[in-house]
Amino acid sequence: MLNVFDVAKSLLNHIEKVYAEEIAIVAYYGSYAQGTATKRSDLDFFFIPATPKGYDASVQFIIDDISFDFWPISWERAERMASFQEDKTTIITDCKLLYTRSDEERKRFMKLRETTSALQASENAQKMIEKAEAELRDVYVHLYKLTRAKESGSLTFYRTEAHGILTKVFQSLALLNRTYYSKGFGKNKEQILSLQIKPARLETYIEMITRSGVNADILEACEALAADTLELILAQKEKHYSKPAYPDRMKGFYEEEKGVLDKIITACERNDFDTAFFSAVHVQDSIAAFLFYAETGQWPSDYTTDFTYQEQYRQLGFPDLVSFLHCHDLSAITSSY
């Protein structure tokens, strides 16, 4: 039986002879690092180049039906993984080092793990909630494609788009719980279902999405999963609302928007509806968003379908410029100033 570490040792010997000054870190991760490897498991390992020439060490090959992919990641990408900007945090946190060029580079790598630990601390909960919310962007892209396809899409199409929704929602939930997955999708179901913050019907949604052969059922489960996940994120955001701080948070805002307000007046004087339309919608939404931020310390979500964040705008008596837009008469806007 092939010993994958014999292969790794041969590769390291080659590195020390040819790339000793070109490669900073070599490490492995996955099933061998976790002690769950089988006879068919490949060795998942990577390296961080120290110089541009170091990238030349990348190689892929197969021995005895076992694949080897010695792939490079830059320090910058490693930092993104460690800071939860990519969904491969486990590669950095759970890998085993095979080679380091120097003590300084080993320390630099270990600091990446400190970055991960720091972001998992309770004081960084708001940052992680924001990252969780950002993950939903692609979820809604996949949902759009499914709803546009309706019944014309094949089961393969539906399952492919649903796969995109599932993986993004799973990642969003991990961030919401300030954690990461130590195993790949398909092997991490137990960890997913053990998350403290998750939709109440998460397991039901997963079963329906992955096992149903009916397009409409898959779409319904995807829509419900996305909606429940968003509701969880918004609830967590609300827990981190801070006290109003208008002078600090809105400092300089009026100066930024005054030019747009002046543009609306000029457009109305010239009966320039197009300019008035784009400027009025923009400035009203901007003011409402800033007021929400000044009141709560957080920006309104991009994914809600209501105007809750504009409530403060209305309560403070600001004019509803958008409703005053009439293509043949702009006088209502100027009189509202």
Image (tube, grey):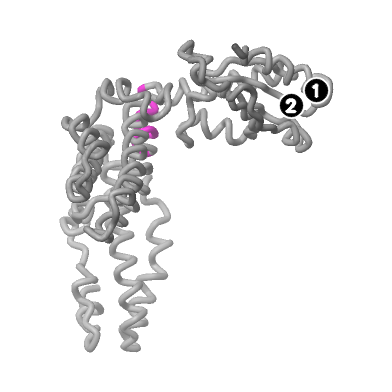
Mark 1: give few (<14), some (14-19) or many (20+) Cα within 10 Å. some
Q: Closer to the camera, 70 or 317?
A: 70
State yes or no: discs 1 and 2 in contact (Cβ < 8 Å). Answer: yes
On screen, 241 above or below 248? above
Kindly state the secondary structure of the residue where label 1 is placed.
loop
Can residue 95 be seen here? The reply is: yes
Is 50 displayed left or right of 280 in the figure?
A: right
Quarter of the N terminus within the rendering:
top right
Seen at 37% across and 48% down, the residue is 138
Can residue 234 be seen here? The reply is: no
Q: Closer to the camera, 186 or 64?
A: 64
State which region is magenta. 122-130
Q: Which mark is residue 20?
A: 1
Is 235 displayed left or right of 182 in the figure?
A: left
Kindly state the secondary structure of the residue where label 2 is placed.
strand
On screen, 280 above or below 327? above
Q: Which mark is residue 23?
A: 2
> Which quadrant holds residue 207?
top left
Question: At which x and y percent is residue 284?
Answer: 28, 64
Is 138 displayed left or right of 212 in the figure?
A: right
Amino acid beneath label 2: Ile
Q: Closer to the camera, 100 or 205?
A: 205
Quarter of the C terminus within the rendering:
bottom left
Amino acid beneath label 1: Ala
Seen at 18% across and 32% down, the residue is 204
Seen at 48% across and 10% down, the residue is 35
Mark 1–mark 2 Cα distance, whole angstroms, equals 6 Å
User: Is most of the magenta stretch helix, strand or loop?
Assistant: helix
Q: Is residue 128 magenta?
A: yes
Question: At which x and y percent is residue 121?
Answer: 39, 21
